[in-house]
Image (spheres, rainbow, N blue to C red):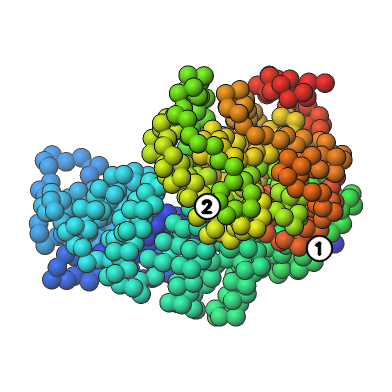
Amino acid sequence: MFALVAGPRYGKLRPAPPVSGAFCVSGMTGMAKKPPFPGPAKGPLFKPQSGPPTVGLPPSAFGGPKPTVGLPGGAQGGGFRPGAANAPQNRQAPPPAAGDIIRLLQLGGAHLAAGRLDHAGQAAAHVLKVEPQNPDALHLLGLVALGKGDAAAAEKLIAAAAGLMPRHVNVWVNLGNAQREQGKTDEALIAYRRAEALDPHYGDIFLNRGQLYKETAQYDEAIAEFNRLIALNPKDAGGYMRAAAAATDAGRFRDALDYCHAVLDNVEGTPPPPLLAIIATTHERLGTLDEAVSWAEKALAVAPLNGGALRTWSKASRRLRKGDKTILGELRQRLERVNLTSCPESEARLIYSELAQLCDAMNDVDAAFDYFTKMNDCTKRLPELERADKHRFVDDLDKLIGVYTEDFAASWQPLPPIDVEPGHADAPVFLVGFPRSGTTLLDQILDAHPQVQVFEEQPFLAQVKKSIAGYPLSLATMSEQARAAARDVYWSALRKHGADLEGKTVVNKMPLDIAQAGLIHRVFPEARIIFALRHPADCVLSCFMQDFVPNASMLNFLTLEGSARLYERVMTLWQKYRALLPLKVHEVRYESLIADLRGEVEPALEFLGLPWHEAVSDPAAHALARGTIKTPSYSQVTQPIYSSAADRWRRYEEHMRPVMPILEAHIERFGYSQ
């Protein structure tokens, strides 16, 4: 039913994880990870100068096709030969002569560009034997350390190089990248500003600073940086596509489409399949499903194995003919014909995800579970997650569980009560719960109320936490002035995103902020918390099934056991908060919500001091009009409320059996044992 034209296979369609940074040695740049939308590569460059020698790297270093790096005549026979260190020798080779330094640095740059980090490091080490303060060798060694994941060592080495050649713009960019990898946002911004002062037209400054802002959810700033990149090179697709990715992350899907179409209007050549697929995916997110199918078919006409295009084509097609068992079977057959062993992990995971959803809709439970498992196995192997620490979030939970004792809560220094912040319409509201517990549906319901403004999944509270030195122990001794400063951080972040604090009840929907209920109570004692609750087994299964954007905390959802153990830790901490602190909490149970919306929502509105309004009774219409749903639940909340998701876990009971003991205590505590 769906004709596809054979053609070459292209790269990934979804916006890739943020670029780790530009890798360069005193002259040219390269990308640390595969850039999501590569533009024309800069050629290699080597220009001996009266000052320190320079080694240029192409933008594809450490990602994409291996670059061809030209070496000067005689370089291969100079003072460093790849693999020579492993050859048997009767005597130690003498250190390189001064005349070999340039050739060694260029050869080291070529190794770095090709991903041969050990060889690149050996070349730098040979140079440093002769010239211990050679800035290019220090820089090169720093880039090797960054490529190996040791950003702290990279920062020290590149900072030393920057001190020796402070007028090299790319060294400051790379220093910023090493700091960014460590989460040193303020330091990285200073380094990027130093680079900009040297050369305000150096595009990699805006690329990497934009990526920093994107990674820290400062999307307006990220888009502004990418706009500067576009202004520098309006014929290069890269700036447009990075701006589109930032707009997508911000939930501004129509803006993302505008940037994609700007590529079609301004960049010469045949539109690349990834661009066409992103346009298709964005239309599917917006619910314009016919457009989504059309653009996906354009991508598949030239790249029939493109995972994102295939998934969008299938997903939009089944949404157009919801409940049609025939189309489900045809789509499944089409996707099962794809040889996924020949696809990159980033492509295969998308197709496994869609196959799993098709099998689930067809009630082929065992096949669905198998495909969900394969999807998650592919995600585990993504290169960008190699250094991600899935234990960090769980370790933070364990730390908080240990800190919050009766003695700790009793030690809190009394602070004056607060009713409502002067000038504000209402006290702050936090919508929390475990992921996949109905928070997105509640978000749409509440935001439909004319007196409510909901902000979806923004790290506002994370900024507050970061501003408090010594958190969490310092909460006990927090002064009134420190509390006021922390509150100002929150208000400023909200205003920056357009919050109408003076006119509306502002709701911050971030499910896993449930782990920061103690912080909420200490800084915002007047705050009200809406706790979204769903059967623990359904939450855990749904998280395992969900193709979340990969990050360290979401790695816990790649196995049922990991998902269940995370749930257990989160809810154990939540129960501690409830026992120790006088939180103002209203519970909304998902199963009751989908059975009787008004019966469950009206008491929640009363808890917020708001009257019933008929607009909240049609969250699907509001979701379609809003057009900015960022979470994976977008396709569910843009259709009428349905009950099929309740007790979904029972269909997978055999697969869930091994993890049920982990959840048993919380199932009992929340009243789901019957």
State how far apart marks 1 and 2 are (Cα): 51 Å
Q: Residue at x 19, y 65 (%)?
A: 53
Q: Residue at x 33, y 64 (%)?
A: 193
Residue closest to the eye, 368 or 234: 234
SS for dot 1? loop
Q: Earlier in the sequence, mark 1 or mark 2?
A: 1
Q: Residue at x 38, y 66 (%)?
A: 204
**Label 2 neighbourhood size at 10 Å, few (<14), some (14-19), many (20+)?**
some
Q: Mark 2 highlights which residue?
A: 491
Percent position (x, y) of residue 488? Answer: 48, 50
Q: Residue at x 45, y 72 (%)?
A: 229
Quadrant where the C terminus sits is: top right
Quadrant where the N terminus sits is: bottom right
Taking the image as shown, residue 600 lies to the left or right of residue 472, namely: right
In the rendered image, is residue 237 in sight? yes
Percent position (x, y) of residue 89? Answer: 16, 41
Question: Residue flagged by tag 2: what amino acid is it?
Answer: Trp
Taking the image as shown, residue 475 lies to the left or right of residue 347, namely: left
Question: Of the numbered discs in the image, which one, if any, rests on residue 150?
Answer: none
Question: Of the numbered discs in the image, which one, if any, rests on residue 2?
Answer: 1
Residue closest to the eye, 185 or 596: 596
Percent position (x, y) of residue 294? Answer: 76, 68
Front position among marks 1 and 2: 2
Residue closest to the eye, 303 or 454: 454
Taking the image as shown, residue 221 lies to the left or right of residue 283, namely: left
Q: Are marks 1 and 2 in contact (CB under 8 Å)?
A: no
SS for dot 2? helix
